[in-house]
Image: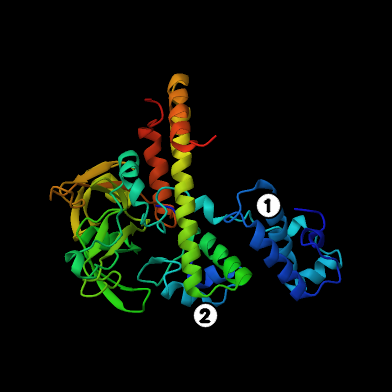
Amino acid sequence: MTQRHYTLSETLEAVSDLTAEQLERYVSSGVVVPVQSEQGPLFREIDLARLNLVVDLAEGYHLDDEALALVLSLIDQLHGLRGDMRAILDAVAREPAETRLRLKTAIREVRVVTR
Amino acid sequence: MADDPYKALGLNKNASQDDIKRAYRRIAKTDHPDLNSDPVAHDRFKAAAAAYELLRDPEQRARFDRGEIDASGQERQQRHYYREYAESDDNPYRQHQGFDDLSDVFSDLFGRGGGGGGGSWRGGAKSFDMRGPDQRFTLEIDFMTAARGGSTRITMPDGSVLDVKIPEGAHDGQVVRLRGRGGAGMGDGPPGDALLTLIVAEDPDWRRDGDDVETILPITIDEAVLGGKVEAETIDGPVMLTIPRGASSGQKLRLKGRGLRGEGGRRGDQHVILKIVMPSRIDAELEHFMEQWRRDHAYDPRGRR
């Protein structure tokens, strides 16, 4: 697999406003879970993106580690559901028009009862 | 990015470093693409992030103020937002907990196992014992460890050191389960498991194709012409390999059963690709011999396509 991996110091270099102590805390509390290797932890692109978000959240909202973990878990759920939803919508879009119409009617019945 | 990074942050040139940081944080709070899906907010955040990147360092800011660098020239490579990774189905941070009411439909549609990762209740209504959650990690190992099996030492996020047994012939994406090394249980519940997804690092000398492996064996011109026995690396250590007389670069020799241990327990093959390497210096004797030889034995390897 050719995926770029970043060492601890490369990660600190790549993520603005992140200190070594903070990073260590985020790893030990499981906020980020780097790839383990015999050379030590390695961070993937997704970990860097997550750390950028973590810095923005932690500094912007003054979140402590517990609150941070909660917010991240909600964001993970939201993003995951959004990805699932996109997949379902793409699948629906590939169906013929009459199937889409049937689904639309069914969704209205289930979801838009009032009105 | 906006022409004026100060404007992107809603500031003017007299702003202090603290003002800059605060302004960026304020915009990040409301407009961060991971929190706000509005495209207008996205544009505002992008401009603010680029501006902050330029102005957060006082020296760089001073150079910009003096006109030595311009705003666009300093733009970092496009920042990737977390959601670009997090929406994909294999996001390692998404542990699929909750959504019990949806999980049947979802596992049906997406082929996922139920609510995986959640704890299961044990002991009926009278006790609160719950098995701890499974925790997922990713572990990178080198090619030889994967091929031969063995053990690799890792440090868990909580600081404890673990020796992980790697099964022989481990492949990319394979999951190793460490019983009882996951999250702590509740009450008398046992701890969960740690699930390690393996990544096999690329190795310049070993290429993998299913259970077969491919290596390159450099040989000298005299070995190529005359044939002979040459030592070649295999997963099990060096073996003597017979080079046929008149071997060419690119020719493949097969070492049966020297590949990786497959699912059924049988091992694949190793393919050794020969590569003729010239001596570091062409001496007068070799040159003279070749000139002589060419006179009577010229041949055209490109002619027979």
Query: Which of B110 and B229 lies nearest the eye of the viewer?
Result: B110
The relative height of residue B284 versus residue A34 in the rendered view (above or below) is above
Is residue B2 in view from this perspective?
A: yes
Residue under label 1? B41
Vertical placement of B58 versus A35: above or below? below
Name the kind of residue labelled 1 in the image. Answer: Ala
Instruction: List x then y, in percent, for residue B45.
Output: 68, 56
Q: What element carries label 1?
A: helix
Residue B15 position, x and y percent, is: 82, 71
Instruction: Work out whether residue A15 can be spotted.
Output: no
The image shows residue B77 at horizontal and vertical percentages of 64, 55
Q: Which amino acid is tagged 2? A: Glu
Q: Residue at x 28, y 69 (%)?
A: B182
Q: Residue at x 42, y 75 (%)?
A: A28
Crowdedness near tag 2: few (<14), some (14–19) or many (≥20) residues, C-alpha within 10 Å: few
* x 47%, y 77%: residue: A25
Q: Residue at x 27, y 68 (%)?
A: B132
Q: Quadrant of residue A59?
A: bottom right
Based on the displayed image, in which of its 4 quarters is residue B198 positioned?
A: bottom left
Residue B215 has which mark? none
Label 1, label 2: how far apart the Cα atoms are: 31 Å
What residue is shown with label 2? A21
Q: Where is residue A97 in the image (x, y as percent from the top left)?
A: 47, 20
Specify the quadrant that holds the C terminus of chain A.
top right
**Local crowd size for mark 1, using a 10 Å CA cut-off: few (<14), some (14–19), many (≥20):** some
